[in-house]
Amino acid sequence: MKLALFAAGRFDTLVQRVAQRITVRCPPVIANNPERTVSPERVEEILEDCILGAVQSPAETRVGYLGKARLKSALKWELREIGYEERFADLAAEKLVESVSRNSRGT
């Protein structure tokens, strides 16, 4: 019997959905621009909206401490591979963990 700490497919699918939504709503060209035309507050709103829209069921957000850490790391690396700067990827990953934490407490 194999012991799995994480349902990797579940996390990977969620991370890909979040990254795809972020890329559509706030592409790296815009997010990485030092002379932003989008305010930091608006970027946070976009990230929250993308994350909330990507979560398809409350069960996806029922994760423990290690699951939250894995989600944060996976989204950060996914966004870095797409071309986002580290600062933006960190912000998005933090927003994902905040959302997951909020949903975990609410259920």
Image (cartoon, rainbow, N blue to C red):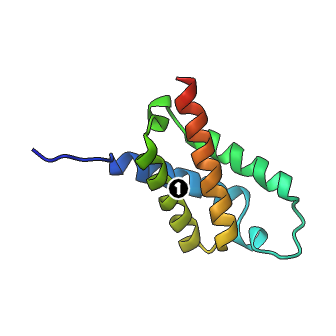
How many numbered circles are shown? 1
- Pointer 1: residues within 10 angstroms few (<14), some, or many (20+)? many
* Residue 88 x/y as whole percent: 69, 65
> In this image, 83 relative to 5: left or right?
right
Residue drawn at 62 percent across, 43 percent down: 98
Vertical comparison of 90 with 70: above or below: below
Front residue (pair 60, 27): 60
Front residue (pair 99, 35): 99
* Residue 43 x/y as whole percent: 79, 56
> In this image, 78 relative to 25: left or right?
left
* Residue 6 x/y as whole percent: 33, 47
Q: Secondary structure at mark 1?
A: helix
Residue drawn at 57 percent across, 38 percent down: 101
Vertical comparison of 88 with 51: above or below: below
Vertical comparison of 55 with 94: above or below: above
Q: Amino acid at mark 1?
A: Lys
> In this image, 67 relative to 41: left or right?
left
Residue drawn at 67 percent across, 74 percent down: 85
> Which of the 4 image quarters holds residue 25?
bottom right
The N terminus is located in which quarter?
top left
Q: Which residue is mark 1?
A: 72
Residue drawn at 52 percent across, 23 percent down: 107
* Residue 105 x/y as whole percent: 55, 28
**Residue sticking out furthest to the left:** 1
**Residue sticking out furthest to the front:** 65
